[in-house]
Amino acid sequence: LEVHVDASSIGWAWAMFGVSTVTGDSWLIQSAAGVFKTKNQRSSHINRKELAALAKAMVAVHAALSGKRQRPLIPLVKMDGIKWYSIFQEIMDDLRSVGVNFKLEKVTSEDNRADSLSRAASDWGFDQLEISDP
């Protein structure tokens, strides 16, 4: 299983791929993309946006492997590093309990298969829309 994650100024995305252990060929299993809807989310540092996208991807992997479908419960809000760490640790521990191992790697935009998905909202002009927080 290979998961690519990306975030841009207004959007996030992840793509989950199955990978053949024999040929190395890969195929798309599932993907998702969305926009950061509030001014606070859009003004967040890119690292926080990437972390939010990663959190959504991890919840999706967990749902796919455990057979449970649920909405990602990890919002993009101001949390300290310890809170983020504990959330990720809980998800990773649960996935490890069913035999999932992790290898995190930084990839270039050219090699990141979620990159174009995270930028689609900008390509469609959504970055020009006025955002009004409730």
Image (tube, rainbow, N blue to C red):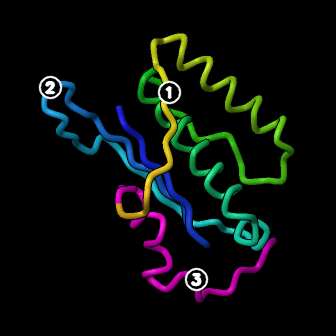
Q: Which residue is mark 2?
A: 22
Helix, strand or loop at label 1? It is: loop
Amino acid identity at mark 2: Val
Q: State the CA–CA distance, disc 2 to disc 1.
A: 20 Å
Residue 132 horizontal side relative to residue 96, left or right: right
Q: Which mark's residue is nearer the viewer, 3 or 1?
A: 1
Helix, strand or loop at label 2? It is: loop
Residue found at x 48% / y 31%: 103
User: Which range of residues does the magenta coloring cover?
Assistant: 111-134
Q: Position of residue 34 (x, y in %)?
A: 52, 62
Query: Do tag 3 and tag 1 residues touch (Cβ < 8 Å)?
Result: no
Residue 111 horizontal side relative to residue 8, left or right: left
Q: Quadrant of residue 35?
A: bottom right
Q: Position of residue 109 (x, y in %)?
A: 43, 63
Residue found at x 82% / y 41%: 81
Residue 67 horizontal side relative to residue 9, left or right: left
Q: Which residue is mark 1?
A: 102
Of mark 2 and mark 1, the one earlier in the sequence is 2
Residue 4 part of the magenta segment: no
Amino acid identity at mark 3: Asp
Question: Few, some or many C-alpha atoms within 10 Å of disc 2 (few <14, some 14-19, many ≥20)?
Answer: few
Q: Which mark is residue 127?
A: 3
Helix, strand or loop at label 3? It is: helix
Of mark 3 and mark 2, the one earlier in the sequence is 2
Of mark 3 and mark 1, the one earlier in the sequence is 1
Q: Which mark is residue 61?
A: none
